Amino acid sequence: MNPTRRLVILIGLFLGATAILGFRYRGASQYRARVKSAQSYLEQGDAASALYVLRELIQSGWREAELLYLAARSYRLMGVPDKSLEYAALAAELGLESAELDMERGLALFDLGRFQEAKPILESRPTKETISALTFLHLNLFEMDEALRDLNTWTMLDPENPLPHALCGDMWVQAPDYGKAAEAFRRAVELDRDNLEVRTKLASSLRELGQLDHASRILRQCDTEEPNNPTVMLLLARCEADSGDVVAARSLLERLIDAHPNLPAALVESGKIDLENGDFESAANLLRRAVQLDPRSDSALYNLASALKRLGRDDDAAEPLNRWSAVQELRRRLRDLLDHIEEDPTDVESHAAAGAVCLELGDSAQAARHITAVLAREPDHAAARQLLARLTGTEHTDLDPALTESRE
């Protein structure tokens, strides 16, 4: 080959290589800038913008482990845990091994309800985020001792967060220990004075402790800030009735019923006041409406039967009284099952039976909790699947009566 021609070719190859290297350098520089931008969005809590940037990079052909990890985190924060798991697996395939990636996997598994898989991962990574997830995990599985331990850890890791204190209060109400509940709710209110729900819970605990004046002051302030809130008004009416101020209680209940005419609890409280003050006909009418709205209300059924008896209508009183007795039997069964669950939270058969009783009592929220506790441990549990189908309206066959039996 001609030396001149050879020189031209070599120069061309050199220039081409230089251009390619320059392009790659500029591409890598832009990549790092875009990744840094996505990280900044995540730090600001803007997962949507972070994911937009990350998806652009992925669609451009980038497959770096760090990029895939950030995508996993963004998808989880966006509420798409299945995609989060997918990208976490891809990052792991590229050799990424980190506590952060493990945490994302654990949190995504938790969000998917795969609690048994999530639990060991989350327990090995004690951060504010994992401890909060572990708290809800243990609450969902009815593992209350573990949940209380997690809440104590959470308050230490995140002392300015009111949520773990409020959750502690909820747990102590269930215990019940209203003194400890009030203490926890009081701390939550100190950290978030605008949270009306927690202030109402504090007032409820104070009422249970007999501190009616303090409870009423809190509730009146809440009523001023948010008029016609049914929870606040009902609790305040009960405080007024407990204090003996029937006029104030009546006034609140009338206002409450005007604003929320189909609230059974308000009708029951108003009916009880009429019953105690000798207006039996009015009491019966109010309580009959309450029973129509909530056929399983213990208080409505019992007080309706009492009002009808006071009116001399014993035959009419027999039907609500019999229904009240049936509800009491269901509640007795549920208490027995909850005692079993307290002794052994992993007892899936007791959870399934408790879920069935809760459905009969019309308490779909508690039924769902017990069904979750079963399916988290045994995803193919037939009775729990049947209960879930009934709860979601996809199954209309009657439940096996044996499901609601107390276990000996």
Image (cartoon, grey):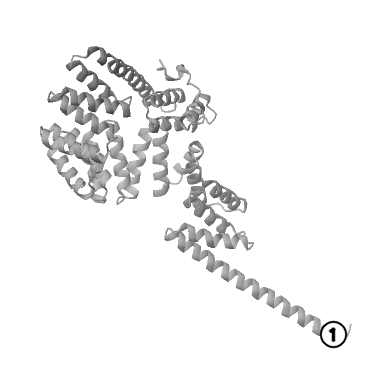
**Up-down relation of residue 306 to residue 228 (above or below):** above
Q: How many marks?
A: 1
Q: Residues within 10 Å of mark 1 (few under 14, many from 20)?
A: few
**Is residue 75 at all visible to an observer of this figure?**
yes
The secondary element bearing badge 1 is classed as: helix
**Up-down relation of residue 13 to residue 123 (above or below):** below
Residue 386: where, in percent of width, then height?
51, 26
Report whether 210 appears left or right of 288. Answer: left
Quarter of the image for the N terminus: give it: bottom right
- Residue at point 27%, 28% (across, down): 289
Report whether 243 appears left or right of 260. Answer: left
Residue 95: where, in percent of width, then height?
60, 53
Report whether 341 appears left or right of 73. Answer: left
Quarter of the image for the C terminus: give it: top left
**Is residue 127 at all visible to an observer of this figure?**
no
Front-most of 150 and 352? 352
Front-most of 258 and 59? 258
Q: Quadrant of residue 250?
A: top left
**Up-down relation of residue 66 to residue 202 (above or below):** below
What's the residue type where badge 1 is placed?
Arg
Residue 74: where, in percent of width, then height?
50, 55
Front-most of 330 and 301? 301
> Residue lying farthest top?
315
> Residue lying farthest bottom?
4
Q: Which residue is mark 1?
A: 5
Residue 365: where, in percent of width, then height?
39, 33
Report whether 77 appears left or right of 301. Answer: right
Front-most of 16 and 167? 167
